[in-house]
Amino acid sequence: MVFSFNQQEYRLTRDIPAELTRYQLPGSSASALANEYLKLLVQELPAENSKAFYSVYLVDKKSNFRLKDDAPFLRAYLALQQDRQLDIAGLGKIVIKEGQFNLLYTPSTDLLSHHDNVPEYLTLDIQYDMALLEEWEPYFPLLANFLNHVRAGQPATLLPRPEWATKEIQDLIHRMLHVPLEEAAQRKHFTLLVNTLLFHLLYQAVQQQPASNYNYYEVDSIQAARDMIRKNIRYHFVIREIAQKVGMNEFKLKNGFRELFGNGVYEYLRSERMQVARSLLTDSGRSIKEIASMTGYRSVNSFIKAFKKMYGMTPGDFRKRVDISV
C-alpha cells in the first residue's frame, strides 16, 4: 500500500510521531507517516476474519493524498470526526459526512483523499470477510445487490448516498475503541462487536433513521459519564459535577444520556444501585444495613423504599425468596 503527496511516495512506518501517541489504542498494530502537510496514524485492530482500521489524520495545511494498492477495496467506511471527501477510481466523488457511513467496493484501490485546513480527522473502516457478508445476504436485498457487483468485479456502493450512524452504532464504535486487546478473550469480544456492528449498519441502511444529535467526542463524553457512575455508585453525583469532569455542556449531557441509555442520569444511578444490591442480597452474607451503605443510601429505610419500588418487594423478602429457591 503506497501513499503519495505531490508525486512523492511515502510508506507507513512503526515510528509514531509524538503528536499521535495519545491516539494509540492498547493492543493495536500501529503505523504512521508524517510530512509537512499531514500526520497519519493507522491502527489495525485484531478481529477474526475481518480487519478493522482506526485512522487519525492531523492536518497542518490543506492537502490531498493518494492511496494506491492492487488489492480490492471492500470496506465499511465511517466518518467519526469531520466530513470525508474522497475521489475513488470507479466510484467518482464521494462525500461521507461526519457521523455517516457506507459500504464501498472497487476491484483495486485508487483513492484520493481531500483534507481542508481542519486540525483533526478520525475514521473507522472495516474490511469485512466476504463469507461474513454472504451470511447476511439473504436478509438484506440491498446487500445482495451490492455483493452481485462485488462478485462481478464492478465498483459499487451499498447505498446511493451515505446513511447516518444510529445511537446503537455509536455505542458499538465506542465499545470497540475501548476494549483492551492484549488477551485472547478480549480479542474475541472485539470480534463479536465488529460483527454486531455489521448487522446494525445493514439494518440502518434499510431503516434510515434520523441522525443522532451527538458527535463522536460527545458520545465519548457521555459514555465516560456512565462509566463514572458505574464505578462510584455510592456517591450521589450532581449533574453539573459530572458535566465538568467529562468536559461537556450540562444540558447536552442530560439529553444525550437519555438518548443513548434510555434513562436520565439519576434514574440510571438508581438502576445501577439496585442491580448491585440485588447481587449482594443473593451472593453475600452482608446485612441489609451494610448493603444500603455500599449502594449509596444514608438510611436503611431509604434503601428499602427504593428497592421495593424497583422490584415490588423489600430486600428482606427478596433474600427469603432466594434462600427458599436454593
Image: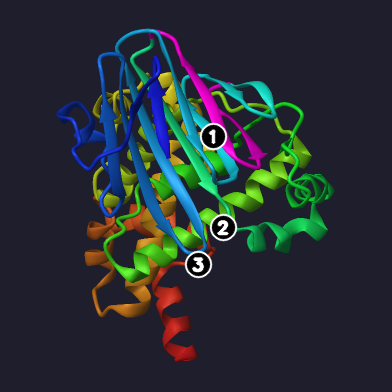
Nearest the viewer among 64 and 79 is 64
Look at the image and tell me whether residue 55 can be seen: yes
Q: Residue at x 35, y 43 (%)?
A: 43
Spot the residue most to the left.
18
Q: Residue at x 31, y 26 (%)?
A: 243
The label shown at residue 195 is: 2
Residue under pointer 3: 313
Look at the image and tell me whether residue 297 can be seen: no
Q: Is residue 307 above or below residue 259?
A: below
Q: Is residue 293 above or below residue 32?
A: below
Q: Is residue 246 above or below residue 250?
A: below
Q: How many marks?
A: 3
Residue under pointer 1: 78
Q: Which residues are magenta?
A: 97-117
Badge nearest the viewer, 1 or 3 = 1
- Principal SS element in the magenta part? strand
* Dot 1 or dot 3, earlier in sequence: 1
